[in-house]
Image (cartoon, rainbow, N blue to C red):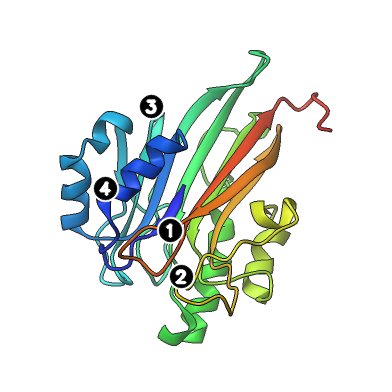
């Protein structure tokens, strides 16, 4: 589940209730404030999601900072996976076992919020394009050439398939959940039926394994102009056929 919390004004109670209702395993938030994090902790978010990674403080925070809450144990965390002229991008890497119990898959989550075009078109476009580097592990010391990996990039990406910068992410190997399911869901703004803009996304990139989006949903949360976007992604060993 991903949500832009609109300067930290989103309802902490509703965030937790929706996470419980849908049995969310990883919650990726943008535009967080210290007060919202405190409210979430008071409501017991640490009991649901014991692992927390917060984006590094940045002078470029656009509306607040990003964070990841997850039920998975972290193999590694990073408070700024890719440097862009916007809020820092936290990431959490964990290991999951395939349904057939035959393969361990490295899964990396990242929560991003590049600038909007109103804050400068060049920074907007470059920030979105730079997100493609999140799935590039060539700069890491370990040889990941044969290890099954799944990178899940979510957030208010301030773009859609209509924008060339967003299409750069798809060309880099990311799959958009909504597009793959054949339906782009409106995620902003909550108070208008039109324009129907999909600014919030769940993207995934599988290497040496296979992945498929199987479900998506949006939910209204008080205090924010974005809808919460929920998605489910299934992971398969490389040899498994997907029907």
Q: Residue at x 70, y 58 (%)?
A: 183
- Write down the residue under mark 4: 13
- Write down the residue under mark 3: 73
The first of marks 2 and 3 along the sequence is: 3
Q: In this picture, is 143 found above or below 63?
A: above
- Write down the residue under mark 2: 190
Q: Secondary structure at mark 4?
A: helix
- Residue 174 in the image, given as x and y percentages of width and height: 66, 53
Are the residues flagged by discs 4 and 2 in contact, CB closer than 8 Å?
A: no
Are the residues flagged by discs 1 and 2 in contact, CB closer than 8 Å?
A: yes
Q: Secondary structure at mark 1?
A: loop
Q: Residues within 10 Å of mark 2 (few under 14, many from 20)?
A: some
Q: Residues within 10 Å of mark 4 (few under 14, many from 20)?
A: some
Q: Quadrant of residue 214?
A: top right
The first of marks 1 and 3 along the sequence is: 3
Q: Residue at x 59, y 27 (%)?
A: 105
Q: Residue at x 30, y 71 (%)?
A: 63
Are the residues flagged by discs 2 and 3 in contact, CB closer than 8 Å?
A: no
- Write down the residue under mark 1: 220
Are the residues flagged by discs 1 and 3 in contact, CB closer than 8 Å?
A: no
Please tell me whether mark 1 or mark 3 is closer to you in this view: 1
Please tell me whether mark 4 or mark 3 is closer to you in this view: 4
The first of marks 1 and 2 along the sequence is: 2
Q: Secondary structure at mark 3?
A: loop
């Amino acid at each position: 589940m991903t949500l832009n919390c609109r300067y930290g004004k989103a309802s902490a109670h509703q965030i937790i209730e929706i996470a419980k209702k849908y049995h969310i395993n990883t919650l990726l938030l943008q535009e967080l404030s210290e007060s919202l994090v405190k409210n979430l902790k008071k409501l017991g978010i640490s009991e649901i999601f014991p692992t927390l990674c917060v984006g590094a403080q940045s002078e470029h925070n656009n509306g607040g900072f990003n964070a990841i809450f997850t039920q998975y144990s972290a193999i590694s965390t990073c408070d700024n996976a890719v440097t862009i002229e916007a809020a820092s991008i936290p990431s959490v890497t964990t290991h999951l076992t395939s349904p057939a119990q035959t393969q361990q898959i490295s899964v990396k989550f990242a929560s991003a919020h590049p600038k909007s075009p109103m804050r400068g078109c060049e920074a907007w476009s470059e920030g979105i394009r730079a997100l493609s580097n999140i799935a590039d592990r060539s700069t890491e010391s370990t040889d990941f050439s044969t290890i099954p990996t799944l990178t899940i990039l979510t957030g208010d990406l301030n773009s859609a398939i209509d924008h060339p910068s967003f299409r750069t992410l798809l060309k880099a190997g990311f799959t958009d959940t909504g597009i793959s399911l054949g339906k782009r869901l409106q995620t902003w703004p909550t108070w208008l039926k039109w324009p129907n803009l999909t600014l919030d996304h769940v993207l995934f990139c599988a290497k040496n394994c296979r992945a498929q989006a199987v479900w998506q949903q949006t939910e209204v949360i008080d205090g924010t102009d974005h809808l919460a976007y929920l998605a489910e992604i299934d992971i398969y060993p490389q040899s498994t056929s997907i029907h």
